[in-house]
Amino acid sequence: MTQEIMECRICSSRELEDVFDLGEQPLANGLLASPGIGEKYPLVLTKCIGGCGHVQLKHTVEPTAMFEDYHFHTASSERMVNHFCQLLLDNTPKSGGVVVEIGSNDGAVLQRYKQKLFDGVLDNYLDPEWDFAVWGIDPSENLCNEAANSRNVDVWCDFFNENTAKEFVSAVGQASLIMCCNVLGHVHDLNSFVQGLALLLADDGKIVIEVPDVYQMVEHLAFDTIYHEHISYFSATSMARLFNQNCLYIQEITPQDVHGGTLRYTITKRVGNSNSVYDRINTEYLMPINWETFKTKVATQKAQLQFHLTQCKKEGRKVAGYGAAAKTTVRLNYFEIDNNLLPVVADCTKDKQGLFIPGTFQLVISPEELQLPANFPHIVVIFAWNHAKEIVKKEHTLVEKGVIFVTPDFLPVLQ
Ligand code: TYD
C-alpha cells in the first residue's frame, strides 16, 4: 500500500536527500474503533537536491485509504469558515461566472458564500447583470453527500486532476475564480493537478491557493503537520517551479496567520511571476533550512512534554488532550505518549467521539464529557494548537473552574 518515490514530484530529478525521518507511523486521521494494533507506514521527509528544492514525503500511501471516508469537517471551525468565505468574497469576479472550490469538504464555506452573495453583501461591487454558478469539487463521498444534501451545494465528487478538469469544463464551463486551500499538499501527481487548474481556469480568471509554508513549519517546530496525507511541503521556490512549468504564474504571495504559517498564492495565466515572488525566492536561497537544528529542537520538545506529563501523573494531576486532529496523532506517536500518560482527548466532532487515537490509544470524548468527574482535568493540552484561542474561548467554563489550558510545549495559552 506504500510506494517509495524515485523522482521529485515536481521536477522529476532523481536526486533526493532524506531530511527528517519520523519512523513508522499510523495514518494520522485513521482513528480506531477499538484500541488495537493498526497498520503503520514509513514517514520520511525527503528533499529534491537536483532541481527545485521541493520537500516531500518519500513514500506515498494509497490515497483511497485516506480520503474516501474523511473525518475532518470544515464546519467544526467557525474561524476557518469565515476565513475562506472572506477569501472568496475578496476575490469574487465583478461579472460573476463559475466559482469553484477544490477540496470543498462539507460545503460549509460555499454555503456561507452563497448566502452572502444572495444576501447582497457584494451588491455595490458586482455588475448588475452578475450571474454565478458556485461549485465544489472533492473526492470524499461522505463529505460530498453532506455538502449536497444538508447544505444545498453543487458538488463534483472526484479527485481533481487533468481528466476531472476536462469533464467538469465540458459539463459546467471554465472558472473565473478557483479557490484551493490546504489541498495541494495532499496531491501525489502535482503536475496533473496543476494542468487541471490551467484547463479549468478561464483566460482572465484567478486561482487563489493557500498552502502551509515549509520555512514557517520549521521555524514554528510544527513537525506534527508532517503526515501521510501531506505529501508536499512547499516553498515559494517550489511553487513557482510547479506553476510556471504548467504555464501559470504567481502574481502575489501574502502570509496568513492560520495553521502555524500559511502562504496565500494568487495565480493567473498572465505570463511572469511578480517581482515580490522573485524577492522571496532569493531570500529562500540565501537562508536554507537547517534540518539538523530542527531535529534537535523537536527532540527537546519531546523530552519536555514527557517530563511534564510524568510529573503530573506522579502528583495526581489529571491531564487531558484537546483536539483529535491529525497533528495530535503525529505528536502523540512521535513523542511516544500513550494512554497511561494521557488517557483522553476531547473533540467536538461527533464522528470522532468514541474512537481511539491510532498507535497511542487515547479515547476521544466530547467536550461535555470533559466536565464529568471521571475526566475533569487539572490541565488540558491543546494538541490542535492552531485553534487554541477559539477552543479556550469556547471552554471558558472550564477556565473559570481553574482548568489550565496549555499548548503542546506546555506553555499557557495566551488570550
Ligand atoms: P485541524 O485543524 O483540521 O487539524 P489537522 O489538520 O491536524 O487535522 O483539526 C482540528 C480538530 O480540533 C478537529 O478535530 C476539530 C477539533 N476542534 C474542537 O474540538 N473544538 C474546536 O473548538 C475547534 C476549533 C476544533
Image (cartoon, rainbow, N blue to C red):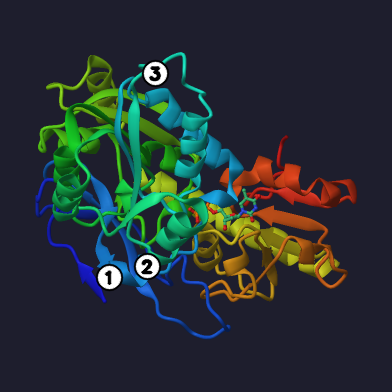
Residue at image location 33% in from the left, 29% down from the top: 131
Q: Is residue 344 left or right of residue 159?
A: right
- The residue sitting at 88% across, 46% down in the picture is 400
SS category of the residue bearing label 1: loop
Q: Earlier in the sequence, mark 3 or mark 2?
A: 2
Measure how far apart labels 3 and 1 are at the Cα level.
Answer: 43 Å
* Residue assigned mark 1: 62
Tag 3 secondary structure: loop
The numbered mark at residue 387 is none
Count neighbours of disc 1 (C-alpha within 10 A) and say few if under 14, some if 14 to 19, many if 20 or more: some
Report, in whole angstroms, how far the alpha carbon at label 3 lies from the one at label 2.
Answer: 40 Å
Q: Look at discs 3 and 2 and give the one toward the viewer.
A: 3
> Disc 2 designates what residue?
66
Which residue sits furthest front?
Answer: 129
Observer-nearest of 394 and 17: 394
Image quadrant assignment for residue 328? bottom right
For badge 2, the amino acid type reads: Met
Asked if residue 374 is positioned above or below residue 99 in the image, the reply reads below
Task: Give the vertical position of 262 relative to 108 (above or below).
Answer: above
The residue beneath circle 3 is: 126
Q: Is residue 55 left or right of residue 51?
A: right
- Name the kind of residue labelled 3 in the image: Leu
The answer to which quarter of the image holds residue 100 is: top left
